[in-house]
Image (tube, grey):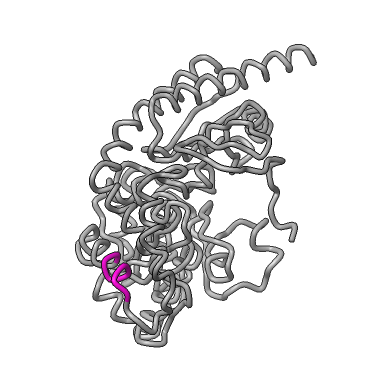
């Protein structure tokens, strides 16, 4: 069905941060399947995990399996005790979190859920109801009732909404990726967490895009020193294999009872085996690698802004998640970059998003800078010639 506006490229195979199409053309991938291919392509650890898993790919959740047990134990170690529920995607993880908040709400007589303007939480009906973007919501109304929008970054608006709606839950992203790579203002998350706690409202942080090393920490909220009631993860934790997870403090997770939620394929042995390998890589070397590469990536963006002030007005992000704010149509630049062998995307008309594989090196960054320089220079030349 025609639900995707695909690029006119058919990819064939990849290695590291590089991919090739069926015509043999080479590309540097600075989008990583929209933040999914954390270890790039054909990484030896992912290949090893897939080979290990072929003898037991699926059991259903009627049975225990060791990869699932190990994955949940590893996540409990990383989060200092959170319980986990595994699904197949980010939107499914968010649906599970929404249901857990509503399940809690049943015990305290609350049902409203708040989420922030500019946020994106998925396209299934519950997560879509928390995504206040008219282009996404309007074709599918009526949506799930009692979801309310709060202006992102505005603590007074949040305090007012908490008092007015008495919600069971609040959903936020540390950095709004689909919204244009917009970090929440410093101090907002910690203040919002305190307000929610005082109001008896569960705080759920959607870490689908920002989690699992993307920002240089396990989670994007860590720099604010908070402990959300619920955390959702997906994308990079599977390194290309479909998996999502909803993590919750033990005292919150206990609101779910057998039969309250489930998914046939969620946390299957194959996905769990790969996710374990990703977590091990992050713990042993990946987080440190992202921290080393992040300032180098930022330096490239600074250099582009300095060299092309007529195109670049700024940049924002953290770790290996960046948005380049431009003064000209971002989509035009993204398509020009694609023609020149660099994969990016434009979540907003004035923003170019970069979510490279976490394994990128200096060679990849140099190629990124060279191609962007060529794209910007060509754009300026074409505008002058057309004037």
Quadrant occupied by the N terminus: bottom right
Q: Is residue 54 left or right of residue 191?
A: right
Displayed quadrant of residue 366: top left
Residue 387, relative to residue 116: is it above or below? above
* Closer-to-camera residue (107/243): 243
Residue 131, relative to residue 8: is it above or below? below
Quadrant occupied by the C terminus: top right
Residue 70, relative to residue 237: is it above or below? below
Q: Is residue 67 magenta?
A: yes
* Closer-to-camera residue (11/260): 11
Q: Is residue 284 left or right of residue 38?
A: left
Q: Is residue 291 magenta?
A: no
Q: Is residue 332 left or right of residue 258?
A: right
The residue at the point 55 percent across, 37 percent down is 19
The residue at the point 43 percent across, 81 percent down is 261
Residue 247, horizontal then vertical, whole percent: 33, 66
The residues colored magenta run 65-71
What's the magenta bit mostly, secondary-structure-wise? helix
Residue 127, horizontal then vertical, whole percent: 53, 66
Residue 208, relative to residue 339: is it above or below? below
* Closer-to-camera residue (281/211): 281
Residue 98, horizontal then vertical, whole percent: 45, 72
The residue at the point 48 percent across, 63 percent down is 89
Residue 170 visible at all: no
Tag count in the figure? 0
The residue at the point 56 percent across, 75 percent down is 145
* Closer-to-camera residue (228/52): 52
Residue 315, horizontal then vertical, whole percent: 47, 31
Residue 297 visible at all: yes
């Amino acid at each position: 069905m025609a639900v995707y506006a695909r690029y006119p490229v058919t990819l064939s195979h990849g290695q590291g941060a590089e991919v090739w199409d069926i015509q043999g053309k080479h590309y540097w991938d600075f989008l990583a399947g929209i933040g999914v291919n954390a270890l790039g392509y054909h990484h030896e650890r992912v290949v090893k995990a897939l080979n290990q898993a072929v003898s037991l790919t699926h059991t259903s959740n009627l049975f225990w399996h060791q990869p699932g047990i190990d994955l949940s134990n590893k996540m409990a170690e990383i989060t200092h005790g959170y319980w986990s529920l595994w699904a197949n995607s980010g939107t499914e993880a968010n649906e599970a979190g929404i249901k857990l908040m509503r399940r809690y709400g049943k015990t305290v007589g609350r049902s409203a859920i708040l989420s922030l303007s500019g946020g994106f939480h998925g396209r299934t009906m519950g997560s879509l109801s928390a995504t206040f973007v008219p282009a996404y919501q309007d074709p599918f109304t009526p949506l799930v009732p009692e979801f309310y929008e709060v202006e992102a970054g505005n603590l007074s608006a949040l305090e007012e909404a908490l008092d007015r709606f008495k919600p069971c839950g609040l959903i936020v992203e540390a950095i709004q990726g689909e919204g244009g790579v917009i970090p929440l203002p410093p101090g907002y998350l910690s203040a919002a967490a305190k307000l929610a706690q005082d109001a008896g409202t569960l705080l759920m942080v959607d870490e689908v895009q920002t989690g699992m090393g993307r920002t240089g920490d396990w989670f994007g909220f860590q720099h604010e020193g908070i402990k959300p009631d619920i955390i959702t993860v997906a994308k990079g934790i599977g390194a290309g294999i479909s998996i999502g997870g909803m993590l919750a403090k033990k005292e919150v997770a206990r609101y779910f009872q057998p039969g309250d939620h489930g998914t046939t394929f969620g946390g299957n042995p194959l996905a769990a085996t790969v996710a374990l390998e990703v977590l091990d890589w992050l713990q042993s070397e990946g987080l440190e690698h992202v921290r080393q590469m992040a300032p180098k990536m930022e330096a490239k963006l600074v250099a582009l802004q300095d060299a092309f002030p007529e195109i670049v007005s700024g940049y924002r992000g953290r770790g290996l998640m960046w948005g380049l704010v431009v003064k000209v149509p971002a989509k035009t630049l993204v398509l020009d970059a694609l023609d020149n062998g660099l994969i990016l995307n434009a979540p907003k008309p004035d923003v170019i998003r970069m979510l490279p594989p976490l394994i990128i090196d200096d060679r990849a960054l140099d190629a990124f800078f060279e191609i962007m320089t060529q794209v910007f220079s060509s754009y300026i030349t074409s505008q002058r010639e057309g004037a």
